[in-house]
């Protein structure tokens, strides 16, 4: 792809999640603690730090790759046995390859040409293609095409005190009341209006970084690999298919608003973070500026149940849908049009 062909899909959303344990960070005694992150909050020229419940980008990326594995396999695209098992070691070293991937890509251990190594590894796994990897022994690095930010409470929710975590008491009981068979334990749950941010470098999927020419096999699979990746993103957000402890802490969740940008041009364009309701209007204004200044074409897709206000003259710049899934699907269709092979 030439620099003028960068196609990017980015998403910002505000998700209300109550009583969730989507990302536990550590155990202290009999307490499983929810992950927390420091957030700087400002008001009236003053700033302070608060610690709030959070869900890491690593957790989101892990579940995205699990979904991608299933979708890729259903489309007869290549994935490894480790991908199918949900372990994404992805060729970290010669020892890892010998232990877990030798039947599939063992020959790369004898190669020294980075182009040939990258080609073999990307050919073998859509997950490695989209999710990236670092093969340390040969210094072959592939940057992830899908990037995820931490889910943190929105700033307006924090200022209103609507971001908290609290330990819930649980018991394990045995009829004989024997020592070590019974236990009291606590699991922290979090509740807030969370932000969600992801960016997919669509045009870089199935593209090689160490080769002067692209691989014909990957060229043939490019549109299918893109389709699998974007379907995985829809599935991730459609039913919140991510997080831990879902068997007993299935969160009460609702996507309050969502904005997707599909851009094409010499540089990426991404949606503004959804830390406050003004993220939609800010994104629309930015899209107009980069369109004129940098020649980036931007299409915007939106779902809103918050009553987010947008200036009248900017409303026509955004396509509005009745659900977050419809908005995501429409954006994905817009992307796929650009990569569907012409007959």
Image: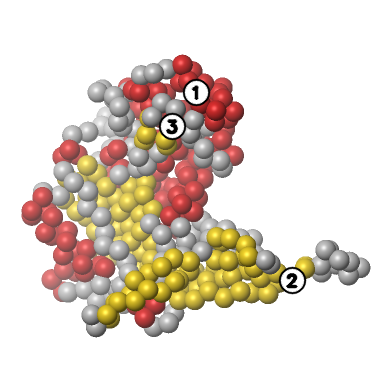
Question: Could you say whether the residue bearing mark 2 is in a helix, strand or loop?
Answer: strand
Question: Residue 159 location, x and y as percent?
Answer: 36, 81
Nearer to us in this view, 249 or 95: 95
Query: Mark 3 or mark 1, which is nearer to you?
Result: 3
Q: Which residue is mark 1?
A: 105
Q: Is residue 234 above or below residue 34?
A: above
The residue sitting at 59% across, 39% down in the picture is: 85
As measured in the structure, the alpha-carbon distance from the residue carrying label 3 to the one carrying label 1 is 15 Å
Question: Residue 312 location, x and y as percent?
Answer: 16, 74
Give neighbour class at mark 2: few <14, some 14-19, many 20+ (Cα, 10 Å). Answer: few
As measured in the structure, the alpha-carbon distance from the residue carrying label 2 to the one carrying label 3 is 44 Å
The residue sitting at 74% across, 71% down in the picture is: 184
Image disc number at residue 184 = 2
The reply to whether callout 1 and callout 2 are in contact (CB within 8 Å) is no
Image disc number at residue 263 = none
Q: How many marks?
A: 3
């Amino acid at each position: 792809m030439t620099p003028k062909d960068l196609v990017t899909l980015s998403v910002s959303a505000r998700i209300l999640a109550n009583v969730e344990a989507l990302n536990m960070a550590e155990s202290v005694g009999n307490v499983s603690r929810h992950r927390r992150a420091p957030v700087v909050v400002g008001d009236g020229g003053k700033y302070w730090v608060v610690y709030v419940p959070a869900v890491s980008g690593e957790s989101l990326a892990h579940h995205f790759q699990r979904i991608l594995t299933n979708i890729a396999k259903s489309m007869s695209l290549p994935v490894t046995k480790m991908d199918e098992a949900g372990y994404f070691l992805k060729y970290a070293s010669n020892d890892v390859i010998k232990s877990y991937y030798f039947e599939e890509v063992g020959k790369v251990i004898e190669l020294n040409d980075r182009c040939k190594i990258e080609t073999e590894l990307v050919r073998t796994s859509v997950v490695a293609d989209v999710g990236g990897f670092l093969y340390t022994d040969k210094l072959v690095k592939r940057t992830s095409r899908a990037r995820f930010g931490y889910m943190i409470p929105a700033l307006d929710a924090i200022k209103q005190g609507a971001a908290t975590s609290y330990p819930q008491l649980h018991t394990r009981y045995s009829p004989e009341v024997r020592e070590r068979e019974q236990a009291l334990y606590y699991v922290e749950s979090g509740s807030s209006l969370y932000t969600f941010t992801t960016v997919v470098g669509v045009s870089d999927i199935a593209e090689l970084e160490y080769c002067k020419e692209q691989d014909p096999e990957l060229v043939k699979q490019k549109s299918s690999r893109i389709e699998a990746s974007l379907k995985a993103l829809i599935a991730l957000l459609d039913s919140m298919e991510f997080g831990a402890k879902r068997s007993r802490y299935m969160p009460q969740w609702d996507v309050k608003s969502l904005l997707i940008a599909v851009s094409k041009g010499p540089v990426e364009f991404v949606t503004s973070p959804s830390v406050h309701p003004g993220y939609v209007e800010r994104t629309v204004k930015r899209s107009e500026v980069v369109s004129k200044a940098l020649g980036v074409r931007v299409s915007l897709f939106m779902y809103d149940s918050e009553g987010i206000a947008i200036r009248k003259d900017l409303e026509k710049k955004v396509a509005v849908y009745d659900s977050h899934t419809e908005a995501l699907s429409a954006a994905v269709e817009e992307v796929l049009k650009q990569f569907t092979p012409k007959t």
